[in-house]
Amino acid sequence: MLALMSACAPEEQVGAPTTRAGQPLNPAETAARIAAINAAATLGNQAVVQEQFTALHSDMMKSMRLQDVTRRVDPEAARSIVLQMQGVRGAAWVDTQNLLVRVSGPELKSYATLNEICSRLDPLGDTLGVTVNLQDVTATTGDAVNTLTRNCQLMPGEQAFAEMPRKMDVIDPELRAQHARNAANARSGNVKSQNDYSKGDQAAIDAIPEM
């Protein structure tokens, strides 16, 4: 039952993109394109040959997470589109890859919003060259201020080929999480026992003179 529930987990939980790159080529589709190219070449139909070859090349690049640089998303057009979305308080390009979008509420800092942004940018070009970073301007707690980041066509944590991951948070989320765990342990009295220390640490503790 649990396995079935996991298999049916909503997209919002897993953060899956609407259009996903980095997947293996579909054997049936690839074979069909090659067959179409051969048939068109035999008939001398260069238009179909070019069309199918371009589509095959696009499929291969997407499988390898390679952005189509001939179809770069226009940054100002993209920013203008995002600013028209309800709940968006600001949008700016941090660099040529990373688009920072600030939203007005925790419910908008979600993969659903991220997917909507990417869908709206899709007509502008290849969104494999766009990584969206969502921040909630109303956030007041440590966890809430963390940035939600994902490439438009990849799963969370994945990068396009040659894309360098960029940290958007002043404090690393993992460091913040570790601090929260330490604080929770302190509140619950879950402190280290003598057996939890290494020999070197225990020796240093034993060497402390009593007052």
Image (cartoon, rainbow, N blue to C red):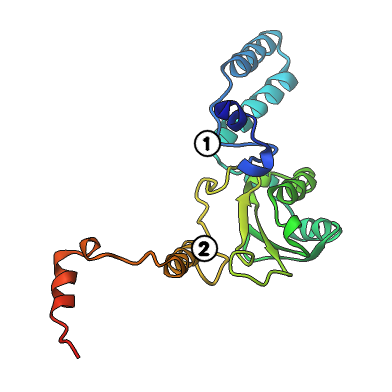
Q: Which residue is the site of mark 2?
A: 173
Q: Earlier in the sequence, mark 2 or mark 1?
A: 1
Q: Which residue appears at 14% of the width and 65% of the height?
A: 199
Give the side of residue 92 with respect to residue 7, left or right.
right
Q: Which mark is residue 64?
A: 1
Give the side of residue 190 with respect to residue 44, left or right.
left
Along the viewing direction, whichever of 38 and 197 lies nearer the viewer: 197
Q: Which residue appears at 17% of the width and 87% of the height?
A: 210
Q: Which residue appears at 71% of the width and 50% of the height?
A: 114
Q: Residues within 10 Å of mark 2 (few under 14, many from 20)?
A: some
The amino acid type found where label 2 is placed reads Pro
> Is residue 123 shown to the viewer in this render?
yes
Q: Which residue appears at 53% of the width and 61% of the height?
A: 166
Q: Secondary structure at mark 2?
A: helix
Farthest bottom residue in view = 211
In the image, residue 209 sits, relative to residue 9, either above or below, namely: below
In the image, residue 5 sits, relative to residue 85, either above or below, namely: above
Give the side of residue 133 with respect to residue 166, left or right.
right
Q: Quadrant of residue 38?
A: top right
Image coordinates for residue 59, horizontal then vertical, percent: 61, 30
Along the viewing direction, whichever of 41 and 31 lies nearer the viewer: 31
The amino acid type found where label 1 is placed reads Met
Image coordinates for residue 34, horizontal then vertical, percent: 61, 15
> Is residue 15 shown to the viewer in this render?
no
Image coordinates for residue 150, horizontal then vertical, percent: 61, 51
Image coordinates for residue 62, horizontal then vertical, percent: 59, 35
Q: Secondary structure at mark 1?
A: loop
Q: CA distance from mark 2 to mark 1?
A: 29 Å
Along the viewing direction, whichever of 59 and 173 lies nearer the viewer: 173
